[in-house]
Image (spheres, helix red, strand yellow):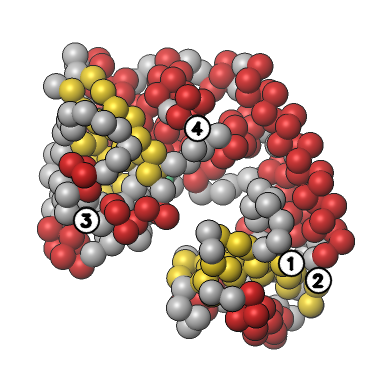
Amino acid sequence: MIYDLYYHNDFDGRAAAAIMLAFLRSRGDDVEHFAALGYEMADQYTKENFFAEHKFFKGKRNPAIVVDFAFHPKAAWWFDHHPTTFKKESWRRKFKSTKYWHYEPKYESCCAEVAAVLKNDFGWEGPAHFKELIRWGDYLDGAHYRSVREVMELRSLGTQIDAFVDRYATDPKRTGKPFIEMLAAKPLREIVRLPAIQHTVTQVLKNRKAALGYYRKHMLVAGRVGYVDLSRKDFEKMRFAGYYFHPSLLYMVRILKKGGLFQISVGQNPWRRKESRVNIGDLMKKYGGGGHQGVGATETKTKKAAEKVAKEIVAYLETKSN
Ligand SMILES: [Mn+2]
């Protein structure tokens, strides 16, 4: 059987896709098209005929396999671990656990979920190097970074691979089919040493230096809350940069430019989780946005509105961080 493989546009999505690909090929099946999915395309994805009508590729559409992304009732195989996976109430009702549809929020990564399902339900175990792939999938998807320096200075195998995926997320020649085939075939420790990846790491660190200079100059601190307006800058997101300079901060509030909109992005210091008493997702809901316990966002049409929201949130979080 020939399938099309859709995966969330991040490291975990690709790792899950790689495991699925190895499994399919081991039983004589294969994948014709590979497509990365992002939440910015939720409007398209939530259409009933998404798989037949999207423009990711031309030609014949094969049965769809979706990993690490929202539920779709037309998917032949589907795996996800995100608690926000059901985008429509009617789709939530359509979902039932079957041999081919798997929703397992207990897994920190979808690659771990896929490997466990294939082992338990299909009696298949991949090559030994998948252990390492899954370990890094859990680590990155769960943001278990040991320190802010590990992330900011790309000090580990996982953060280096992740920087490469992030930098070329929309370049399928670099992070599409060939990359997924590589993840399926080789240990990560070998992949990370490739010149293309090490070159990207050097580049990212160089760009980061400039962005960090801007942060250092423009970031404001109120109590244990950091605030920076990045809406005029085309920086990579660097959601942890505030903690790099001020490790004692509990929260960061940033204004970013997203398409034509202004996004107010709020995060909790992941190295000080225990000290935080605010559910950021709930807080952002009050401003028409959403998120999880540790991170959330909302959007405004104008810069002025974004500044007003950001100011209110900074003041509120300051009262909660003494
Ligand atoms: Mn994931």
Q: Which residue is mark 2?
A: 220
Of the two numbered discs 4 and 3 on the same chain, state the one appearing first in sequence.
3
- Where does the image place residue 61, in percent across and percent down from the top left? 18, 32
Q: Quadrant of the N terminus?
A: top left
- Where does the image place residue 109, in percent across and percent down from the top left? 42, 43
Front residue (pair 2, 25): 2
> SS of the residue at dot 2?
strand
Q: Looking at the image, which residue is at 39% across and 38% down?
A: 36
Kindly identify the amino acid type of the residue bearing the numbered disc 3. Answer: Lys
Q: Looking at the image, which residue is at 67% across and 28% down?
A: 200
Q: Which residue is mark 1?
A: 228
Of the two numbered discs 4 and 1 on the same chain, state the one appearing first in sequence.
4
- Where does the image place residue 119, in percent across and percent down from the top left? 26, 29
Cα separation between marks 4 and 1 = 29 Å
> SS of the residue at dot 1?
strand
Kindly identify the amino acid type of the residue bearing the numbered disc 1. Answer: Val
Q: Which residue is mark 3?
A: 47
Of the two numbered discs 2 and 4 on the same chain, state the one appearing first in sequence.
4
Cα separation between marks 3 and 2 = 42 Å
